[in-house]
Image (cartoon, helix red, strand yellow):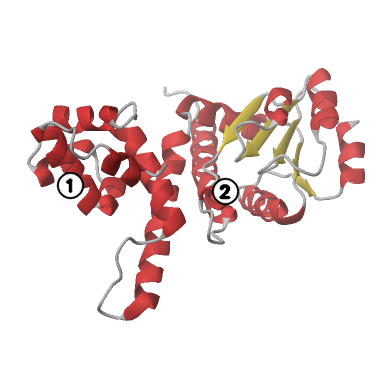
């Protein structure tokens, strides 16, 4: 059931404050996606307590969960009303821009800052680095590989499973393997990852599937927002989300290298 249907199902049973919040949500669903509870409170003239109670009344834990549910719903169905000005092309462009923007913002929300720092240091300190990914996922592999090269960090990128098997038999203590597997289907990296970890190596996993079994075989795992799965009726591109995460990771790597070069203060 969509968030709008949840709200409409309760019409007639709400308190005055709840009804006011419900009316605002129904009339301004896009505002919910792009605004904090404080902003909604100021725009609607309702207290944050009233807004929170309304969210809980329709089955959400709070405003953050309602906003996430509304975001997924609007991404799937598109804008609620048509634009009378320049037709559907302008409306579609704005909708796509808004959808990508919201998911790019969410990348920073899911990042564990401490884990990001650990991974950046691990990349800087690794003796050997191998980066794996097949098919479309290899685009992210090459992006990371090329950018690391520009930072002076040598690495080897592979999309060939036979080569990966050979590499897995070599990597060990002090080495690092970075695996890109967005949905977990296809290539079975698990035994190769285990082989590296068992010899003292590190394995970082970058995925979009929180239920992927490979998470259990990695020493560090990052789960990114899965835009192509959430956007049921469109063809939004996962690689844009991956590239955004890589930009954040590469920035942290650059900072880690500068810190190591600077050394301790006199």
Disc 1: which residue: 24
Q: Is there any visible trace of residue 192 in the rendered image? A: yes
User: Residue placed at 65% from the left, 51% from the top?
Assistant: 140
At numbered mark 1, what does the secondary structure look like: helix, strand or loop? helix
Give the quadrant of residue 9. Answer: top left
Q: Is residue 49 left or right of residue 194?
A: left
Disc 2: which residue: 229
Image quarter (top left, top right, bottom left or bottom right) of the N terminus = top left
**Front residue (pair 153, 230):** 230
Q: Is there any visible trace of residue 100 in the rendered image? A: no
- 261 relative to 88, above or below: above
- Closer to the chain start, of discs 2 and 1, is 1
**Front residue (pair 126, 62):** 62
User: Residue placed at 33% from the left, 39% from the top?
Assistant: 6
User: Percent position (x, y) of residue 216?
Assistant: 70, 23
Residue 257 is marked as none
**Front residue (pair 234, 113):** 234
At numbered mark 2, what does the secondary structure look like: helix, strand or loop? helix
Q: Is residue 196 left or right of residue 15?
A: right
Give the quadrant of residue 202. Answer: top right
Q: How many marks?
A: 2
Q: Is residue 211 left or right of residue 203?
A: left
User: Percent position (x, y) of residue 242?
Assistant: 57, 48
User: Residue placed at 78% from the left, 46% from the top?
Assistant: 156
Q: Residues within 10 Å of mark 1 (few under 14, many from 20)?
A: some
Task: Give the Cα distance between marks 2 and 1.
Answer: 29 Å
């Amino acid at each position: 059931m969509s968030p709008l249907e949840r709200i409409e199902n309760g019409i007639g049973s709400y308190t005055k404050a709840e009804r006011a919040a419900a009316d605002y949500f129904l009339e301004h669903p896009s505002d919910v996606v792009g605004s904090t509870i404080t902003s909604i409170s100021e725009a609607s003239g309702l207290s944050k307590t009233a807004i929170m109670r309304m969210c809980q009344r329709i089955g959400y834990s709070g405003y953050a969960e309602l906003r996430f549910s509304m975001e997924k719903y609007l991404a799937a169905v598109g804008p609620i009303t048509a634009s009378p000005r320049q037709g559907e092309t302008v409306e579609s462009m704005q909708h796509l821009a808004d959808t990508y923007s919201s998911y790019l913002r969410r990348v920073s929300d899911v990042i564990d800052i401490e884990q990001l720092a650990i991974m950046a240091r691990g990349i800087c300190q690794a003796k050997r680095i191998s980066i794996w990914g097949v098919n479309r996922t290899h685009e992210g592999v090459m992006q990371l590989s090329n950018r690391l090269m520009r930072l002076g960090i040598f690495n080897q990128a592979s999309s060939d499973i036979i080569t990966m098997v050979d590499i897995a038999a070599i990597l060990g203590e002090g080495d690092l393997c970075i695996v890109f597997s967005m949905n977990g289907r296809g290539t079975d990296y698990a035994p190769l990852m285990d082989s590296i970890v068992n010899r003292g190596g590190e394995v970082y996993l970058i995925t979009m599937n929180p239920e992927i079994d490979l998470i259990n075989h990695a020493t560090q795992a990052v789960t990114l927002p899965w835009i192509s799965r959430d956007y049921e009726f469109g063809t939004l591109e996962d690689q844009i989300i991956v590239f955004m995460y890589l930009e954040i990771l590469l920035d942290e790597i650059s900072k880690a290298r500068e810190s190591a070069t600077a050394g301790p203060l006199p």
